[in-house]
Amino acid sequence: DAGVIQSPRHEVTEMGQEVTLRCKPISGHNSLFWYRQTMMRGLELLIYFNNNVPIDDSGMPEDRFSAKMPNASFSTLKIQPSEPRDSAVYFCASSFQTEHLAKNIQYFGAGTRLSVL
Amino acid sequence: SQQGEEDPQALSIQEGENATMNCSYKTSINNLQWYRQNSGRGLVHLILIRSNEREKHSGRLRVTLDTSKKSSSLLITASRAADTASYFCATDAGNNDMRFGAGTRLTVKP
C-alpha cells in the first residue's frame, strides 16, 4: 500500500482565497483524522471521521474550515476564505478501528504545507 | 488540545549515547504511543504500550509506563545520527480520543 496520500504537498495562496486540501487514506482503514501543526500550538486535531461520518469537529477553528468525506477513499479539508494565520502544515492520518480493538495506531500522510500571504 | 507533555523540549547527544525522553499526561488512558517525525515528514508510529503494561521493548527502543504517576519514558539506546527527529507521545483514551504532546526534538551528533 502507498500509505496515506495528501495533495498538494505545498500550497501558497493569497489571503481571501479558497484552499482545498486532499487526502486518500490507506485502503481498508475506517477512521480518518485531520491535524494542523504549527510551532506555536503543536499538533492539533481538527476533525475526525469514522466510517465516513464526522464524529468530532470540535477542533475546527471556525466556520471558515470545513471537511468532507464523500467515500471511504477520499477526504477534503477546505478553508474559505483563507487568512495568514491559517499558515501551517496540515496532516491527514488514517487508522482501522473496531469496537474491540483497544488501540488506535494512526498512519500519517506527508502533509500539506500551506502558506497564506 | 494537547494532553501529553514531553520533557525535555530539546535534547542533543553524541552518536552512541542513550537518549531518554519523558511524557506526562493528565487523564486515564487505554494506551500510550510514541511517534517519530523527521523534518518535513509525517509522524510515524514507533511503539504502543497498553495501560496494564509497565515496560515494552522494540529493537533499540524501550518504553516504560507508570500509570500511578501518569508518566512514560522512551529510551533510545546506542543512538545514531539517523535517530535525529522529533518524538511525540500520544495518549489514547479510547473512542478515537488521542492527544499528542508538543514533542522532544532530538539531535544526535555524529
Image (cartoon, coloured by chain):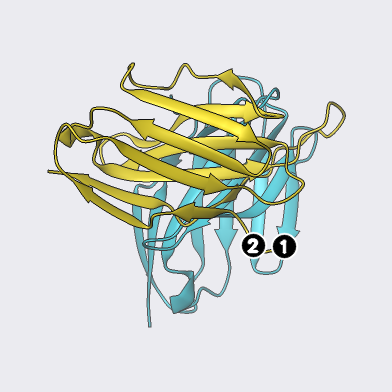
Chain colours: A yellow, B cyan
- Let me know if residue B102 appears in the view: no
- Let me know if residue B49 appears in the view: yes
In the image, A24 versus A110, the foreground residue is A24
Residue at the extreme right of the image, as rendered: A100
Q: Are marks 1 and 2 on the same chain?
A: yes
Q: Quadrant of the N terminus of chain A?
A: bottom right
Q: Amino acid at mark 2?
A: Leu
Q: Is residue B97 left or right of residue A45?
A: right
Q: Position of residue A51 (x, y in %)?
A: 72, 29
Mark 2 — residue? B61
What's the chain of the residue with tag 2? B
Q: Residue at x 65, y 20 (%)?
A: B28
What's the chain of the residue with tag 1? B
Is residue B104 positioned above or below A79 on the image? below
Q: Residue at x 58, y 69 (%)?
A: B77
In the image, B44 versus A10, the foreground residue is A10
Q: Residue at x 23, y 27 (%)?
A: A81
Mark 1 — residue? B58
Pointers 1 and 2 in contact (C-beta within 8 Å): yes
